[in-house]
């Protein structure tokens, strides 16, 4: 153990860096924002650096506690802003390199998928924290109780309530959509490429062949750029909307460059105009059909976009 005043900051930085990726992972799932998650991690580091370590038995537990509490406070303050948000709110995209590795894909998709993050929006900040710590990160209730300052029995109740809320939402959604079957990563990539090419050509029939009849398209412009204020439902409406985008681009001589990536562990596409990212879309694929499209267009959510391995 290094005890000199000169070396303590170095020791703390090394210890913090060992858990930095975990802290970001928790904060992003809590907040649905890369920028906010990075802010929370930075604030956690400042408090870790300035605080006393005399009673800290576990750096991981201590740092998780700081990050989680910061995120709970941020979520509570964000509630009003979300209620006043113009149009559909979608999480800030977390873009990663394209992979067909099924292990990595499943690991990412389990707790990063856009649909899952939107489901979490139905939970209170405290429910969200307990649910994620338990289900996504495998913390014991005894550990969670120390993080949120509640008894383990209370944490179990909160987690049970959160699971029930999510199960109710999922059951209603699945009842409307019917049973779906997973598509392999290779098939997802092939279908995404077909979608990309059909979109670039404005091929209405080509799009209709790829879209599920009950597809839903969400578009988040944040009131700053053109976007659908309400979700679009149905293959005909969605295909027509996508063809209209293509025609508008032709009319204005826009030449979009499309890049195949993964967005929150799902197949995705980046739309670029020159060096500027105009849109990012995440694609839900099951039964070899596209049944959800999430277009993130809010410039604030694309400002810090970069390839990331977090």
Image (cartoon, grey):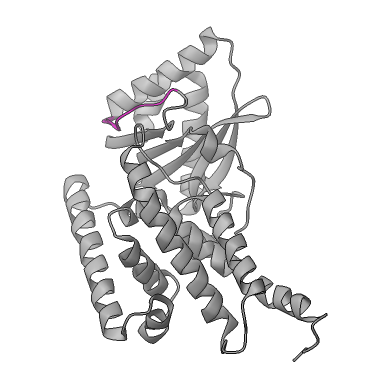
Q: Is residue 231 magenta?
A: yes
Q: Quadrant of the N terminus?
A: bottom right
Figure check: 234 above or below 112: above
Q: Is residue 212 visible?
A: no
Q: Position of residue 69 (x, y in %)?
A: 44, 68
Residue depicted at 46% across the width and 42% down the height: 282
Residue 287 lies left or right of residue 172; in this view the side is right
Q: Is residue 291 magenta?
A: no
Q: Position of residue 281 (x, y in %)?
A: 48, 37
Figure check: 80 above or below 208: below
Figure check: 191 above or below 225: below
Residue depicted at 72% across the width and 73% down the height: 13
Figure check: 123 above or below 291: below
Residue 281 lies left or right of residue 145; in this view the side is right
Q: Is residue 37 visible?
A: yes
Residue depicted at 30% across the width and 36% down the height: 216
Q: Position of residue 304 (x, y in %)?
A: 61, 43
Q: Nearer the viewer, residue 248 or 119?
A: 119
Residue 235 lies left or right of residue 29; in this view the side is left
Q: Main secondary structure of the magenta part?
A: loop
Q: Nearer the viewer, residue 34 or 107?
A: 34
Q: Nearer the viewer, residue 146 or 215?
A: 146
Q: Quadrant of residue 258?
A: top right
Q: Position of residue 177 (x, y in %)?
A: 22, 46
Which residue extends farthest right? 6
- Magenta residues, start to end: 226-234
């Amino acid at each position: 153990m290094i005890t000199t005043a000169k070396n303590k900051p170095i020791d703390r930085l090394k210890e913090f860096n060992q858990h930095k990726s975990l802290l970001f992972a928790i904060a992003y799932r809590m907040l649905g924002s890369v920028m906010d998650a990075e802010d929370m991690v930075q604030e956690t580091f400042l408090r870790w650096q300035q605080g006393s370590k005399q009673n800290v038995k576990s750096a991981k537990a201590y740092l998780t506690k700081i990050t989680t509490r910061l995120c709970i406070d941020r979520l509570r303050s964000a509630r009003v802003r979300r209620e006043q948000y113009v149009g559909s709110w979608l999480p800030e995209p977390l873009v990663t390199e394209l992979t067909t590795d099924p292990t990595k894909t499943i690991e990412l998709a389990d707790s990063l998928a856009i649909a899952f993050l939107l489901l979490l929006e139905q939970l209170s900040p405290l429910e969200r924290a307990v649910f994620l710590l338990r289900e996504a990160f495998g913390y014991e209730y005894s550990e969670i109780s120390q993080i949120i300052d509640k008894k383990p029995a209370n944490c179990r109740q909160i987690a049970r309530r959160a699971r029930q809320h999510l199960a109710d939402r999922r059951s209603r959604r699945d009842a409307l959509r019917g049973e779906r079957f997973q598509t392999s990563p290779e098939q997802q990539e092939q279908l995404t490429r077909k979608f990309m090419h059909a979109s670039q050509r404005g091929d209405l029939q080509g799009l209709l062949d790829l879209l599920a009849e009950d597809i839903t398209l969400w578009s988040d412009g944040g009131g700053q750029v053109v976007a659908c204020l309400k979700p679009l439902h149905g293959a005909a409406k969605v295909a027509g909307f996508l063809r209209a985008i293509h025609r508008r681009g032709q009319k204005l001589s826009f030449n979009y460059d499309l890049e195949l990536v993964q967005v929150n562990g799902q197949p995705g596409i980046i739309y670029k105009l020159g060096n500027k990212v105009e849109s990012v879309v995440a694609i839900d694929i099951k039964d070899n059909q596209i049944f959800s499209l999430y277009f993130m267009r809010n410039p604030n959510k694309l400002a810090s976009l970069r390839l990331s391995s977090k």
